[in-house]
Image (cartoon, rainbow, N blue to C red):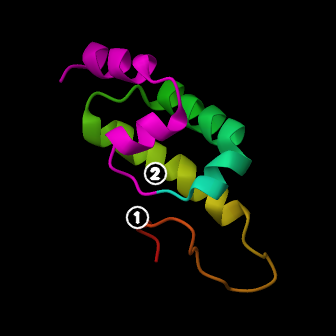
């Protein structure tokens, strides 16, 4: 899949859930309902900065956006681990 193909695929999504499903990333619907706008903005920002060329690169960017928001919700005074993302590589 070329860069233009992956960009067309991403542009065809009408919701962030479609992107998460397409890139096979597990998610919590309550989290998505609460942080949808922030997640979409962060993912789009990563897409602009990185210009991904394949499915794996796009998946990594979406996972990074999801994890960044999840980690931002953690209590800064404790050393709690990220538990919200079912596909987190930082566990």
Image quadrant where residue 53 sits: top left
Relative to residue 44, is residue 34 depicted above or below?
A: below
Neighbourhood count class around disc 2 (C-alpha, 10 Å): few under 14, some 14–19, many 20 upward = many
Can you tell which mark lies on residue 70? none
Give percent across and percent down for residue 4: 29, 13
Give percent across and percent down for residue 67: 55, 58
Image quadrant where residue 82 sits: bottom right
The residue that disc 2 covers is 63
Report the magenta stretch's main SS: helix
The residue that disc 1 covers is 87
The answer to whether mark 1 and mark 2 are in CB contact below 8 A is yes
Instruction: Looking at the picture, tell me which residue is in the foreground, 34 or 1.
Output: 34
> Which residues fall within the magenta stretch?
1-26
Neighbourhood count class around disc 1 (C-alpha, 10 Å): few under 14, some 14–19, many 20 upward = some
Q: CA distance from mark 1 to mark 2?
A: 8 Å
Q: Is residue 25 magenta?
A: yes
């Amino acid at each position: 899949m070329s860069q233009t193909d992956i960009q067309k695929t991403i542009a065809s999504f009408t919701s962030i859930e479609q992107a998460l499903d397409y890139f096979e990333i597990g998610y919590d619907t309550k989290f998505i309902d609460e942080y949808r706008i922030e997640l979409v903005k962060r993912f789009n920002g990563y897409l602009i900065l990185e210009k991904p060329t394949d499915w794996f690169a796009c998946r990594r960017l979406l996972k990074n956006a999801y994890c960044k928001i999840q980690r931002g919700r953690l209590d800064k005074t404790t050393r709690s681990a990220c538990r919200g993302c079912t596909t987190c590589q930082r566990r």
